[in-house]
Amino acid sequence: MMRIIGGKYRGRVIKMPGGLDVRPTQDRVREAIFNVIREKIPGSDVLDLYAASGAFGIESFSRGALSVAFVDNNTKCIKAIKDNLASLGESVKTTQILKSEALMAIDRFRKEGRRFDVVFLDPPYYRDIAKNSLIKMSTCDILSQRSFVIAEHFKKDVLPREISGIALFKEKRYGDTAVSFYRKK
């Protein structure tokens, strides 16, 4: 069972999508991520790519994010996100939920002129998805001037140190999981 670890909804349960092989981010890893970026969340526009349960976006709401866009391509994940938000009573005015492939959603945000301050990127491991998503994001100009991108990936996946205007500034490892922190240069 996952719980919100900080902010006004601390302790509330986050339901996982049923019947899927989803790899939820451990509480200690989520807490470590939010410890690094805690000052960036209040008042920010957040993108939760490969959202699954929406845990990163919901945690951001709990900590004062202005808006969150959730993106996942699986119907069960979209339902879990909607159910989790409904249990918190969050306003749909500050939420966008897209059932879409992540790279297509990035294109859509580019066309809409949408920019994000914080992006959580937690794709399936092993398929260069994190790397390809970082490349797409950096070339589509969906990142604000003060943006941070947090990429969770398998520890043996090598992500670039710098990509079109964003640069790695910190990397942490937790067992088989690595978390790479990028910011706009």
Image (tube, rainbow, N blue to C red):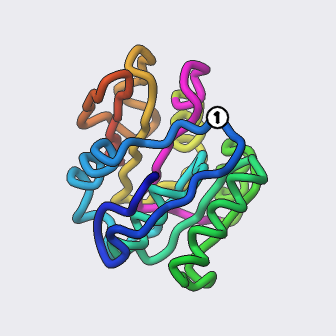
Q: Is residue 127 magenta?
A: yes
On screen, residue 15 versus residue 159, left or right, reads right
Disc 1 designates what residue? 21
Structural crowding at the residue carrying mark 1, measured as other residues with C-alpha within 10 Å and reported as few (<14), some (14–19) or many (≥20) = few
Identify the residue at horizontal 54%, vertical 25% (top origin).
125
Q: Nearer the viewer, residue 177 or 181?
A: 177
Q: Residue at x 53, y 31 (%)?
A: 130
> Range of the magenta residues?
113-130
In this view, 166 is above or below 47: above
Q: Is residue 43 visible?
A: no
Going by the numbered disc 1, the residue's amino acid type is: Asp
Which residue occupies 31% across, 34% down? 168
Residue 14 in the figure: left or right of residue 183: right
Give residue 137's position: percent from left, percent from top: 55, 44
Picture coordinates of residue 40, whole percent (x, y)? 29, 63
Q: Is residue 121 magenta?
A: yes
